[in-house]
Amino acid sequence: MLLRGLLASVENGVNRILRLDSTAMARLQPLTGKVIAVECAAPPLQLFILPSDEGLLLATQWAADADCTLRAPASSLLRLVLSKDKTAVLHSPEVDLEGDSHALMALAQVLQDLELDWEYELSRWLGPVATALISGHLRSRANWYQQGFASLNQNLAEYLSEEARTLVGQREAQARFDELDQLKLDLDRLEARFERLGRSLNSSDNA
Amino acid sequence: MTDQRKGSDAEPTTHFGFKNVPESQKAEKVAEVFHSVAAKYDLMNDVLSGGMHRLWKRFTIELSGVRPGNKVLDIAGGTGDLARKFSHLVGPTGQVVLADINASMLKVGRDRLLDKGVAGNIEFVQADAEKLPFPDNHFDCVTIAFGLRNVTHKEDALRSMLRVLKPGGRLLVLEFSKPTNPLMSKVYDAYSFAFMPMVGKLILNDPESYRYLAESIRMHPNQETLKSMMVEAGFDRVTYHNMTSGIVALHRGIKP
């Protein structure tokens, strides 16, 4: 019952987040009626996900058969939850899919494409004027921090590579890599030439 | 636990809480209780169960195995907690019937569901669980949550539910039952007979309705008795799951 209570809270939270994206529920609608089972091998745990246009229904058991079953170790499931590229995790070898994988892929895609409209949620609580002021301030702060971080990053990289000479600069490294590539090609050509000479010497000996 | 039906000319009696009343009066008295509590039924459920009733109903949904296109009957559906979930699960090709003998409860349930945009695949029917007005072999799943203990002739109701179910269909009975832990039983008794009527008085100014609720729970068949009643009615593979130390049990039976 404790697990069921926990799951109900998680379901409530997930559905709140889904509602912040104006397209998520509409995209979940075609998945209505699909039952997706998630089986964690270690620790042994089973979870059923039923998507619909109302969000996700999470259950610890479901009396009907699942349309799609996902079996994976806890580490892969955690990566699936946290990773931005969920499709790549689903294609990894330790993840086993059985049944109609389209339902799971479509659900993963919806979760991956979430664009949360947090300003709308904030405006429901604080009103449009306060939200506009707060979000404008937060946005300019975020831009300032982003620019500051990018600038710091660039200055530090330049100092380490150009002034302190602790690291090799990007262009310098690229030039060295190009030289190495050229050297590798030259060696390949030389090896091919030696091989051809060897073959022609062998044929003249036989004659 | 069976209802008392006397063989003599005197009208048979049945229990209404701890009292015995003529059978013809029980439905009327139960109706009075629910007319009184209908408006604040959900609030009272949340206050008295500490929100646990949502988890009990959630488990019922999980065991129902309802799929798109299924026909579901929710008897004594009250304010429509289960019917709302079923409506989403069966989709536009399915059908949900919310039935309740009490017009006030049905009205509250209907208004609440329509306000939440639940419509199209749901019907509201005022019906007696003992004489369900539906064809034979019609529903894939029948549920009755916290309603069976208020029914005068439980055996008749179970037989009626069996009749309307399709072969292979499931009956789920969610109902208060007997706590499995003696300590919990004592705490629960004190809670039911002291706290529940007090909250009933504070919120609804109606302690009697909640005294009846506590008494009717004690008079309801325990887990094993209800299981044997379902087997006698003709259900197959009858199982039950205790929840919250047996305060509530979910019985499931399949129509053969």
Image: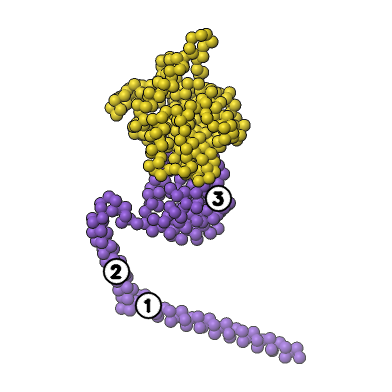
Of pointers 1 and 3, the one earlier in the residue sequence:
3
Gap between marks 1 and 3, in whole Å? 50 Å
Compared with residue A134, is residue B150 higher up or lower down, i.e. above or below? above
Residue behind mark 3? A68
Residue closest to the eye, B242 or B168: B168
The residue to which callout 2 is attached is A147
Identify the residue at horizontal 40%, vertical 31% (top origin).
Answer: B105
Q: Left or right: where does residue A197 sit relative to residue B154?
A: right
Q: Amino acid at mark 2?
A: Gln
- State the image coordinates of residue B82 (x, y, percent, origin top left): 45, 37
The label shown at residue B216 is none
Image point (37%, 24%), residue name:
B33
Question: Label 2, label 1: how many angstroms apart (C-alpha)?
Answer: 22 Å
**Chain letter for the yellow part:** B
Q: Which residue is mark 1?
A: A169
Q: Residues within 10 Å of mark 2 (few under 14, many from 20)?
A: few
Count of numbered marks: 3
